[in-house]
Amino acid sequence: MKAFEVVTEPINPQLYSDYVLRPEAGAVTLFTGHVREWTKGVRTLYLAYEAYVPMAEKKLAEIGREIEDKWEGTSVAIAHRIGELQISDIAVVIAVSSPHRKTAYEANEYAIERIKEIVPIWKKEIWEDGEEWIGDQKKKPKEEIL
């Protein structure tokens, strides 16, 4: 396991939590992002993620450095899964440890927003009646689909 990695197999969140746990840590936050079935009334059958893996892992590590620079005493591990993911599968895990819980929460939220902004991972949503590559993961499904 690497601290910042793109994987093709199911993610075990405990590995990443254990990776960041240190004696000086008073808190570990663990975020897992899952494939959801319904988004604004549109049923998703499954998702397909693709990535340029070397660049994606480099960007995940960059996010880790940003967090460790911004919040002193933090330690970060992030994994994102690619390939075909079924409903409820874990797509991403972010583990952050810090001396205090507030910092761990803030840093963890920062990480998921930065992943959406800068990491070259592409998501294709496959619905009952169509499919679409989602370029900007911050966008919501198109209103006309509803």
Image (spheres, helix red, strand yellow):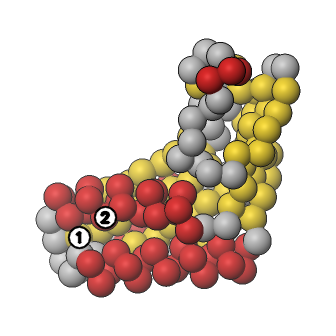
Residue 75 appears in the picture as rendered: no
Does 117 sit left or right of 145 as displayed?
Answer: left
Where residue 99 sits, quadrant-wise, is bottom left
Residue 19 x/y as whole percent: 43, 72
Give the camera-side residue of 23 and 70.
70
Few, some or many residues within 10 Å of mark 2 (<14, 14–19, 20+): many
Please name the amino acid that badge 1 sits on.
Answer: Ser
Residue 68 x/y as whole percent: 32, 80
The residue drawn where x is 69% and y is 52% is: 135
Q: Please identify the quadrant where the C terminus is shown.
A: top right
**Numbered label attached to residue 42:** none
Q: In the current view of this chain or complex, which residue is farthest to the front?
A: 144
Please name the amino acid that badge 2 sits on.
Answer: Ala
Residue 36 appears in the picture as rendered: yes
- The residue carrying mark 2 is 107
Earlier residue among tags 1 and 2: 1
Mark 2 residue element: helix
Q: Please identify the quadrant where the N terminus is shown.
A: bottom right
**Numbered label attached to residue 98:** 1
Does 44 sit left or right of 24 as displayed?
Answer: right
- Residues under labels 1 and 2: Cα distance? 9 Å
Contact, CB < 8 Å: mark 1 with mark 2? yes
Residue 70 x/y as whole percent: 26, 78
In the image, is residue 11 above or below residue 90? below
The residue drawn where x is 62% and y is 23% is: 143
The residue drawn where x is 84% and y is 20% is: 129
Does 33 sit left or right of 44 as displayed?
Answer: left
Give the camera-side residue of 134 and 96.
134
